[in-house]
Amino acid sequence: MTVQLGLLIGFAITSSSLVDRAQADLWIVPRGAKDVDQAGNMLDRQKYRALGVNGVDSVQSLIVRFTDWKRPDGGTESVIVVGIDPVRPFLQPWNLKDGAIVDDLHISDGVVIDELYSQKLGVSKVGETVEIMGHRARVVGITSQIRTFTQSPYVFANLKNARTWTSLPDERTTYLLARAEPGANLASLREALRAALPGSDVWTSREFSWRTRFYWLVTTGMGASLLIAAVLGVIVGLVIVSQTLYSATMERLEEYATIRAMGATNRYLRAIVLRQSLVSGTLGYVVGTATALLVAWLSRTSSATLMLSYPLIVILGAVTLAMCVGASLISIRKVLRVDTASVFR
């Protein structure tokens, strides 16, 4: 259960990482865009109409498009080019290990990649050159642990390079990111932008983040499969704990009969079985959680990661103990029906 739910949370956070990391209050997106990785395009000049809306402080273009990356060995990989304004970017590569974002993205052919996908992209250090859609590109920066849900790596570039490498006309962009003036009401500003830009959708950053997560985890069925696996974990746990407790109870049925013959109450007998189930559940929870934390630590260098938060661990602890208590009901029923006369036979 811990691993499956950790993967679910990890996938959700990964899928919307671009939205969550952007320092923007509102996203102006092409009509019908369901997630940040896949969208059409829109006229870049709409930013000037957005700037004319009262309450908008600044607007910046952002390009997010799939394209082909040609490895030095001749192989081809699909990547997502993220084109940003290198001067004062609302979104920029984070966890930078090598290079300088502001300076390096001004380079005419500069591109920033993540170390998790360096082997996949056929590069290992700053300065190496590759080919993107027939154009030369040079690695000028390397980040750490910027994952993608689609497994097509994010590669960051300036807007000019991004348009060239994705064959996007100069007058087009994928998104417009807007910052609100201090104290502006985002809900009112969102509606004003929708009225000013009727051909586009406008979402707050939080709304577009959840829209992206909903698309990947619910619409595609990925989240449902992980939840079903977690539910199956509960069912399997119930069966295993029930069988274990029942077997232990049957082996000591005569002892329970003796205790009952000595005058033990039903409440006392229930407490014995419940303590056994809670001790078993606690030990299993500790071992299982420790294993899950180890898996999460090992996954930090992989393209898929487990996100285990303290609330999740606490909730799963409660679920585990409740599962064990439920599994003990069959054993309790058997103990309460034991024949005390069997002791004297």
Image (cartoon, helix red, strand yellow):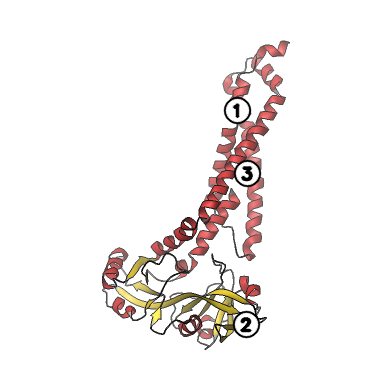
Q: Quick check: 173 above or below 135? A: above
Split into 4 quadrants, where in the image is the C terminus? top right
Horizontal and vertical percent position of residue 60? 39, 78
Report the mark closest to the observer, 3 or 1: 1
Q: Are marks 1 and 2 in contact (CB under 8 Å)?
A: no
Report the mark closest to the observer, 1 or 2: 1
Residue highlighted by disc 2 = 126
Going by the numbered disc 2, the residue's amino acid type is Val
Going by the numbered disc 3, the residue's amino acid type is Tyr
Going by the numbered disc 1, the residue's amino acid type is Ile
- Left/right placement of residue 284 relative to residue 109 reads right
Q: Foreground: 231 or 54?
A: 231
Image point (42%, 75%), residue name: 174
Report if residue 98 is visible in the image: no
Residue highlighted by disc 1 = 330
Earlier residue among tags 3 and 1: 3
Horizontal and vertical percent position of residue 307? 56, 57
Q: Quick check: 318 above or below 190? A: above
